[in-house]
Image (tube, rainbow, N blue to C red):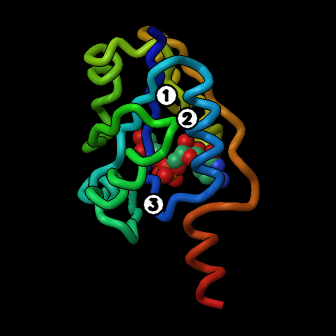
């Protein structure tokens, strides 16, 4: 079984997120999403509209997602890769190169972001 792992806030889920999750699942058999906690979002200078439990409920309902775990800090990735015997670590290419240290433990793949959509764009557009 090939296990895939990815991280994110996944607030106000949109088709860019779904495209990422769909492609990530296509790289293996079991997709784990490490979902940023509300506290970690503060460290990322992000304020999610939905709280962690709500974002987790939504993610768990997506057919491509097999397990949701909490992301609580920047430093848990190696431990997560080992703990869940991850074969492939995947992120959108806005993170290109940032997690190459994981190449010692698993495959690292950066997938092209979906253009013209983001949670912040949604928030901005709704204010118009
Ligand atoms: N994404 C994408 N296309 C978009 C928007 C997002 O492919 N139009 C991808 C991002 O590249 C990321 C995932 O969807 O891989 C989740 O995006 P965010 O929730 O914005 O995640 P982020 O805040 O970048 O968290 O430790 C890593 C961080 O937790 C990543």
In the rendering, at what x and y percent does residue 32 appear?
40, 30
Residue assigned mark 3:
11
124 lies above or below 14? below
Q: Residue at x 39, y 71 (%)?
A: 49
Q: Mark 3: few, some, or many residues within 10 Å (few <14, many ≥20)? A: many
Report the side of 104 relative to 112 (left or right): left
Image quadrant of residue 80?
Answer: top left
Q: Secondary structure at mark 2?
A: strand
From mark 3 to mark 1, how far is it between C-alphas?
22 Å
107 lies above or below 24? above
Q: Quadrant of the C terminus?
A: bottom right
Give the number of the mark in front: 2 or 3: 3
- Residue 101 in view in this figure: no
Residue assigned mark 2:
91
Q: Is mark 3 within 8 Å of ligand 1?
A: yes
Q: Is mark 1 within 8 Å of ligand 1?
A: yes
Q: Mark 1: few, some, or many residues within 10 Å (few <14, many ≥20)? A: some
Contact, CB < 8 Å: mark 2 with mark 1?
A: yes
59 lies above or below 26? below
Residue assigned mark 1:
99
Q: Secondary structure at mark 3?
A: loop
Q: Is mark 2 within 8 Å of ligand 1?
A: yes
* First reached walking from the N terminus: tag 3 or tag 1: 3
Q: Residue at x 31, y 18 (%)?
A: 84
Q: Quadrant of the N terminus?
A: top left
Contact, CB < 8 Å: mark 3 with mark 1?
A: no
Q: Nearer the viewer, residue 64 or 3?
A: 64
* First reached walking from the N terminus: tag 2 or tag 1: 2
**Which label belongs to residue 126?**
none
In the rendering, at what x and y percent does residue 76 appear?
28, 30
């Amino acid at each position: 079984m090939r296990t895939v792992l990815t991280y994110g806030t996944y607030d106000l889920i949109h088709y860019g997120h779904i495209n990422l999750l769909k492609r990530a699942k296509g790289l293996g058999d079991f997709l784990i999403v490490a979902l940023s906690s509300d506290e970690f979002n503060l460290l990322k200078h992000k304020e999610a509209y939905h709280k962690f439990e709500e974002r987790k409920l939504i993610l768990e309902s997506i057919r491509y997602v097999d397990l949701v775990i909490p992301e609580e800090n920047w430093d848990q990735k190696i431990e997560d890769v080992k703990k869940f015997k991850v074969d492939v670590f995947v992120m959108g290419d806005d993170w290109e190169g940032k997690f190459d240290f994981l190449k010692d433990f698993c495959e690292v793949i950066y997938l092209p972001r979906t253009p013209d959509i983001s949670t912040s764009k949604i928030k901005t557009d709704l204010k118009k």
